[in-house]
Each structure stands twice: as structure tokens, then as C-alpha cells.
Image: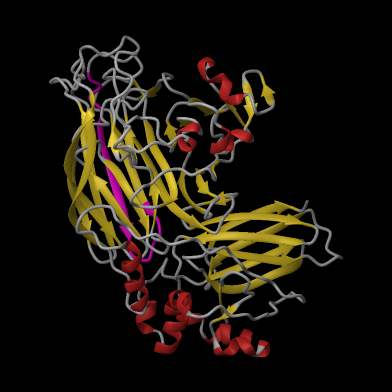
Amino acid sequence: MYRHVSRVGTKFHQGSENSANPENASAAREESKDLRRSRLHDPSWLESADPKRRNEVNGGGMNWFHDRLTRATVGSPGQSKATSMAIGIPSRIRLRFTAGVVSAVCAFHAALAASAAPDQVSLSEQTVHWSTVKYATAGENGLVKGSVDKNTIIDRTFRTRVLENRYLKVVLLPEFGGRILSIIYKPTGHEQLYRTEVGVPYGMGEGNFYYDWLMVYGGIFPTFPDAEHGRTWLKPWDFRVVTEGADEVTVSMSLTDNFEYAAAPAKFRKGSSGIEATYHVTLKADRAAVDTRLVLKNPHDKAIDYEYWTCTTLAPGSDPSNPKTTGGAEIIAPIAAYRTPAWSKNIAEGDANAGPGTSRFEKLRHFRNWPTMGIAYAAPDMQGGNFWGVINHENEEGIIRIADNTITRGLKMWTWGFPSFTNETDQRKEPNPARPYIELWAGVSDEFFHSAEFPARSEVSIPETYSPTVGMSNVTHANANILINLSAEASGATLQFFSIEPATPLRIVMKRGETVLFDDVVTADPKNGNRLFAPIPADSDAEQVRLTIGTADGMELIAATARVK
């Protein structure tokens, strides 16, 4: 029996003719087990399945978007009361990213119409148009003094590479910082990353940046070997196709730090580091997340000091034509405390003291509570927590980075302050750099200008997964398969989840002690999200609820516990 997570107000949408007869459920599960081999192991399972079952297991997970809202109540093994699923429905906004680009929403509906066909990944070339105010740079990328003219806007054109599957459209910009410029989540048609409409140089002559100025474009990009955006944010990176097939496209962007800026402020490193960087970006069929791997190599016979930070500018659930962080944005990170530099201490005034030099990470989670621009660092660092990101509570869409944060232990948080949202101006009429977005950084050290050591003739590899979320108000656990928000109180356990392979049937089991609260196979809803509430019997007294989510044939994907409040 397959259960599709349904829309607002629904209990279950039943995807099998056996669902109506609970006595047949167990037999049906055994009979179809061979048809439900997870595509995590064997994508060919759909080809060998009976056509009716194939549509039930895979296509049904897509086609029910177009059905009318249905209502049904079904008992699950070990459960006497009905279990309900419901989730909010986000609005849809069509993609208008660049001339000649088809709407991501329309593309997703086309994918729905052909959902019985296998998903495929494509790679194409397109162009993106970006405007900046007028400025000029010298040969080493220093800004020519007096060249900035905010009354004159210049249009620039870049060549981009676009990776697409059924769920995502990912735009890469190798020639300006080797960055992921855009991630469109097709089920909602929304942008996940911030992108400046009009670039404006700032910080000139203040000594804060390597080239003594900066201009933000946005997206996700590697920065090294120095702090504060490093040296490579405006450099062209070499592009190469590594793998190109229907099941997977992997490309790379690479650059070697063999350059220097002679007039760099004194706090930055002199000379070139020689570090070789390659940024791999992978999109796979049937996967609603983009996977990256940044590889750094030290070619020298001696250890060197360096910094590496992945910079992300996040604006989940945005209009693709005007991506920005909204007033309902919250930073999601499994940390309890943070610290600020002395000049940023005012941003911590709303949070309680957490010990010497630190504050409790409570109010500052919310964008609306940032009074001005400022920096906050996880204190003492990420402590091994493997995810962070932003959720937009106005439509409950998010973007979450999942990684081994024992490698990138630093988390730096920065915004221009909430007034950048409330006082937002027309970028073309009043161009200024203070725009509404949340900038989160993952670093190999705990904060800027704290160097890490790069051993001689060695390599650092940083795998990352960037996953959208829908219908989730928080994230408590995550990995490269599933993101969940699990909580429990005396009346029952609540689960919100996002499956990175939405068409793969999932076996969800929730227990309190030995009491089974829920045990069944479901298919995730990639558009509206997934929420499940399992009542807890009054005679159950274990301290924790235990959750396991796996494939229908038994491979565990994620496990978690929640203390009953």
C-alpha cells in the first residue's frame, strides 16, 4: 500500500487499490516488494515493473498534484487512531531569468505530464544579462579611483551553463567567480539564491577586502586563500564537462591562485599561494538537490597557511525575476550560541548571554531581528552539525546546505540588516549595495582571519549538497537523502520531511518505546511538502520517539529521535 502525502486538510491520498481493504495491505506489500527496489540501488526497477504498478509507484507520486483534494483516513500497523498529513501550499511564480529561457513552472508541468518516462539530465549553454553601475579596474583588479558612477548603468552579458532535471534548473557562471548563480526549484517555480540586479562597488579604500573593494553578484561560490571573499570572486574559472549522460551531468570549474594584488591591504597575505582549486557540480536524474565537491591542492613541498570559505547568498522561495530574502526568513542551524566581532556587538543585544563573549542563538535566527549589518560566528564552531540554511516562512520554502562540518567547521552569518528589506529601493533608480539577502559561509577555520594549515603536497575535499525544502518550518536532522523536522509531545509526534529523491517510495516507522505509532510506505509530495502526525497512546511512557525512514525494500536512509515534551 502506497500513501501519497497530500494537500492541505487531507489525511491520506491512497495510491493502491488494496488501500481500501486493510486486510489486504500486508499481502499487497509482500507481492509488490520486488517492484519497489529503490532507485538508490537500481534505476532499472521501473522498466521491469508491471505498467499499472509502475504508474502507482512512480507516476502517482507526480500525478496526484492535478487531482482534486481528497480526504481519507487509514489505520496503519500498530496504530488504532487515524494519522493525518497536511501541508501548506506555496504560491507559484514563473521563471523570468534571461531572454529565451522557458518557464521553470511550465517545464515542471511538462515533466508531470510525462512522469511515467524516466527523468533525464540536460546540459546547455545560455546567456545571462547583468547590470552594474559604471566603474573601471586596473590590470590587477584594483578599482580605478573616481571611476564609480552610480548615475550610469552598464549592461553586461555572461555565458552560463545550465544543468536541468525534472526538479531543478541550476545555472553556473564560470567566468565570474566560478559560481552557482541560480537554483530554480521547478515544482514551485521559485528561486533559492539571491542575485543582485545592479552591482555596486563598495568598501573602496577601507582595507576590508583583498582588492580593497567588493561588488556582490550573488549565488554560491568558493573563496580562498584569504578571508572576506578571497581573491577569486571576480576571476574567470576554467570550465570542463566531466560526465554528461541522461542519468548524471558533472562539470567542473577550476582556477589556480598564481596571481597577487600588489596594493592589497596589509592584513592580507602577500604573494600567491599556488593553491589549485576545482569546483565539481553534479546533477542527477530523479534527484531534487545539487551536489558539489570543492577540491583544493597544495602543490608545495611545505605546509602553508590559508583560508577557505564557501560563500552562499540565500533567498529561498523567491520570485526568480527579483530574488531576495523576505521578512519571514529564518537562519536554520543546529547551534546554541554565537559570537560577534566588537564592531558588530549591537546585533546581539536582543539575545541572552550564553557565556563570556557569546550570546544564545535565538532572536538573531530571524532576519527581522538584525537591526543593522553585522557578522556573527557559530560559537565555538559548528560542533559537527552537518547542515545549515534558510527557510522563508512566508511560503515555507528553504534551501539547506548539507556537508561534513568537521571539515568546514566555521559558520559565518552576515546580512545588511533588516532595514535593507523594509527600506528597499528601486535598484535601477537608486543603486546601492545594501540589499535584502542572508549570507552564510562555511569555512575550514572558525572565523575570518584565523588561518588553517594546509599540509605539504596534500588535498582538501569538501563535498556539499544543496537541497530545497518545501512545507518545512524547521530542520532537525538532514543528510544527502532526507531532511526532517521531528518533534514530539504527549499527544503525538509530528514529522515534516523533504525527500531528495521524491519519486522513491519511503518506509516510515515511528515508535515510542515498543509502541508503533506509524509504519507504512509513502510517496513524497515534492510540491507541497510532507507532514505527518502520529497520536501517542496514553499508556506509552518512553522518553523518546524514534523515527526511521528507509527505502521500501529496507535500506535505512535516516534515523532520528525526539524527546517527548
Query: Percent x, y for residue 107?
Result: 31, 67
Identify which residue is drawn at 49% across, 32% down: 419
Looking at the image, the residue that sits furthest to the right is: 539
Looking at the image, the residue that sits furthest to the left is: 139
Question: Relative to 371, is 35 on the left or the right?
Answer: left
Question: Relative to 73, is 148 on the left or the right?
Answer: left
Q: Quadrant of residue 232?
A: top left
Query: Percent x, y for residue 152?
Result: 20, 30
Query: Percent x, y for residue 390?
Result: 50, 44
Query: Percent x, y for residue 171?
Result: 27, 51
Relative depth, front residue between 290 and 50: 290
Relative depth, front residue between 451 and 5: 5
Relative to 356, is 280 above or below? below
Mark yes or no: residue 398 visible.
yes
Q: Quadrant of residue 173?
A: top left
Relative to 252, is 177 above or below? above
Relative to 210, is 153 above or below? below
Colouring scheme, one of rainbow, by chain, secondary structure, one colour: secondary structure
Residue 453 lies in the magenta-colored region: no
Total labels drawn: 0
Magenta extent: 272-290
Quarter of the figure that contains the N terminus: bottom right
Identify which residue is drawn at 32% across, 9% down: 266
Mark yes or no: residue 411 visible.
no
Question: Relative to 372, is 93 on the left or the right?
Answer: left
Identify which residue is drawn at 30% across, 12% down: 265
